[in-house]
Image (cartoon, coloured by chain):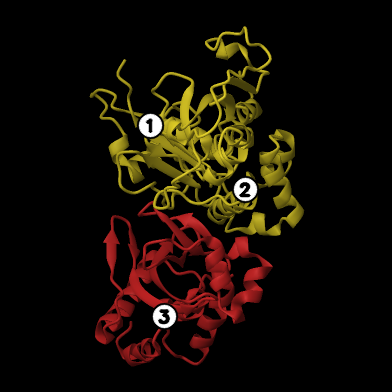
Chain colours: A red, B yellow
Amino acid sequence: MEEDEFIGEKTFQRYCAEFIKHSQQIGDSWEWRPSKEAFELPLDDCEVIETAAASEVIKYEYHVLYSCSYQVPVLYFRASFLDGRPLTLKDIWEGVHECYKMRLLQGPWDTITQQEHPILGQPFFVLHPCKTNEFMTPVLKNSQKINKNVNYITSWLSIVGPVVGLNLPLSYAKATSQDERNVP
Amino acid sequence: MTDDKDVLRDVWFGRIPTCFTLYQDEITEREAEPYYGKDSSVSFNVVSSLPSMMLYTLEWNRILLLLPRVSYLTLVTDKVKKHFQKVMRQEDISEIWFEYEGTPLKWHYPIGLLFDLLASSSALPWNITVHFKSFPEKDLLHCPSKDAIEAHFMSCMKEADALKHKSQVINEMQKKDHKQLWMGLQNDRFDQFWAINRKLMEYPAEENGFRYIPFRIYQTTTERPFIQKLFRPVAADGQLHTLGDLLKEVCPSAIDPEDGEKKNQVMIHGIEPMLETPLQWLSEHLSYPDNFLHISIIPQPTD
């Protein structure tokens, strides 16, 4: 069985470096934080959502970490109202966009749960990584077929991000195509 | 000579005598009514000779319990919750949480790990304070239901198998097998649990062990909650890696210099295995039910 769908830690770092480069170019606020043996991209994002009662502003913070157990990136995030009140797991489940709701309801406890951030030790919500390879393999195989360079992180984040309210500007995808000649 | 299977039983049935006391600021109702268990004449100090008595109530705001090392706090404290809720006003009760000497206790860590890491150098019983108010959102995960504990437990098992077998063994199991693992833990059923878990301890005949060893190393002196890395049980030359090899590679500060004084204890399930012990053997016999080796590095107690 091919190991294409897994990415090693060095490869993860390389893709992250390219991703950050573009983030800096467009003024997106991703940061690279090399902590002792792992890497993360925290992003402060503000999003306005309509709730039944009133418009509430929710602040999201996203971190991308590398899981050496699954050899894939994992998305951690936390969310709070502006007064600092954190959202509950139930709030997060309820906030998932309609088009992903079905998948979530099939197995909420397998999809998004609260877990301890492995570096910060604080509670975060996590999108479970065990199914990552299922949807990344076709993406990678297809890109090989049409001989197009793909930044794994950009592709992965553009697939999983929207489930939890993170939408990447299209320019990230275009940036990868432009770098085609430079990537070894 | 102890059989290897006896080790599995000893690990599973390990217990910690624990005294749960309700946080005094949360006592809002009732006069102090002494409330004793069946043998009120039995002295509190004779804890060691109470193997069959699982629960002993001392006072209305204190309960003594033998906690299973391999389980989780929120899974085994229903009696504690029910008992203390009787002495509180309904409106004051919110999610239960536990604390030891000011440190909120992470329910998602196995009980034995919490004890070894935080309280093993103190005298028994382990004194835990129970809270129902002011949940520490920044420190603790919420535990809204038993489903949360099951999800966490199964998630750990899946990660362990991803390391050991590229998830092949656990993914081949049926849902009912996964349920049996959880029910075995929940109901303290050793045979029920191991009937399935033994499959997760197998490896191909041509190999000498698992692909990687699921482990986490904990120290209270570091920022990061634990160390976890990829580590193979067998070296390239076929030699079995030992516990000492693991520490040298991922946590060298834990190893004491040969000629120097012993500074640290390397503890699993309340014991200090010899550093020469093969890691593969430790993984098969001293893992917690989640299939991880949870290892505590604690300062050598000075007494």
Inspect this view and state whether residue B204 appears. no
Q: Chain of mark 2?
A: B
* Residue B182 placement (x, y as % from top left): 68, 46
Q: Which residue is mark 1?
A: B101
For numbered disc 3, what is the local secondary structure? helix
Rendering coords of residue B199 (x, y %): 68, 46
Tell me the amino acid under the disc marked 2. Tyr
User: Which residue sits furthest left?
Assistant: B260
Residue at left 58%, top 43%? B90
Mark 3 highlights which residue? A154
**Residues at marks 3 and 1, CA–CA distance in whole angstroms:** 45 Å
Helix, strand or loop status at disc 2: loop
Residue A97 shown left or right of residue A118 in the figure: right
Image position of B131 with respect to B164: above or below: above
Residue position for label 2: B203
Q: Is residue B125 above or below residue A81?
A: above
